[in-house]
Image (tube, grey):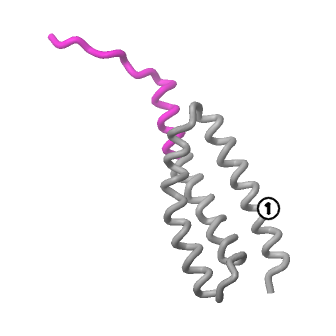
């Protein structure tokens, strides 16, 4: 009979599941916030700004997923994404106040 390796604990499984949810949901949220902010902040015509912002969000979402899985703990990853979302949300709020 083959020797079994160390078993994976429930805590480790929950950490991976939490990271998957955080990477998917947080990545989508941050990509959406950044696309909205960039579409208002880029000094281009509106259609070009929206296209450029949307394309940049397609690059940002996998980067966020990589960052979430590279962090040491799920808590640190969640706090990092929350901080980024707070900064982007504040920037979007300020940009919308000055938008025509």
Q: Is residue 33 left or right of residue 96?
A: left
Q: Which residue: 56% across, 53% down?
A: 25
Residue 6, placed above or below residue 12: above
Asked if 36 appears above or below 18 in the picture, the reply is below
Quarter that holds the N terminus? top left
Q: Position of residue 31 (x, y in %)?
A: 59, 62
Residue at 55% x, 43% y: name it: 68
Residue 47 image position (x, y, % from top left): 59, 87
Q: Answer whether residue 8 is magenta in the image.
A: yes
Q: Which residue in the rendered view is the most extreme toward the front? A: 43
Circle 1 Cα neighbour tier, 10 Å, few/some/many (<14 / 14–19 / ≥20): some
Q: Is residue 5 magenta?
A: yes
Say which quadrant the C terminus sits in.
Answer: bottom right
Check the image and report above or below for 23 versus 31.
above
Residue at position x 48%, y 38% in the image: 17
Question: Taking 6 as reference, is 9 left or right?
Answer: right
Whether residue 15 sits left or right of residue 76 in the image: it is left
Task: Name the residue at the left extreme.
Answer: 1
Q: Residue at x 46, y 30 (%)?
A: 13
Quadrant for residue 29, please give it: bottom right
x, y (%) of residue 73? Answer: 59, 31
- Rendered image quadrant of residue 72: top right
Magenta span covers which residues?
Answer: 1-21
Q: Name the spot of residue 75 as percent of width and height, x first.
A: 64, 35
Using the image, determine if residue 2 lies above or below residue 81.
above
Q: Nearer the viewer, residue 22 or 42?
A: 42
Q: Secondary structure at mark 1?
A: helix
How many numbered circles does the render carry?
Answer: 1
The residue where tag 1 is placed is 90
């Amino acid at each position: 009979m083959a020797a079994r390796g160390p078993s994976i604990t429930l805590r480790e499984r929950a950490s991976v599941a939490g990271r998957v949810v955080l990477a998917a949901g947080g990545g989508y949220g941050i990509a959406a916030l950044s696309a909205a902010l960039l579409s208002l902040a880029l000094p281009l015509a509106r259609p070009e700004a929206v296209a450029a912002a949307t394309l940049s969000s397609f690059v940002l979402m996998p980067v966020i997923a990589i960052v979430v899985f590279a962090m040491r703990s799920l808590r640190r990853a969640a706090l990092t994404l929350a901080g980024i979302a707070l900064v982007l949300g504040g920037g979007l709020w300020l940009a919308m106040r000055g938008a025509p």
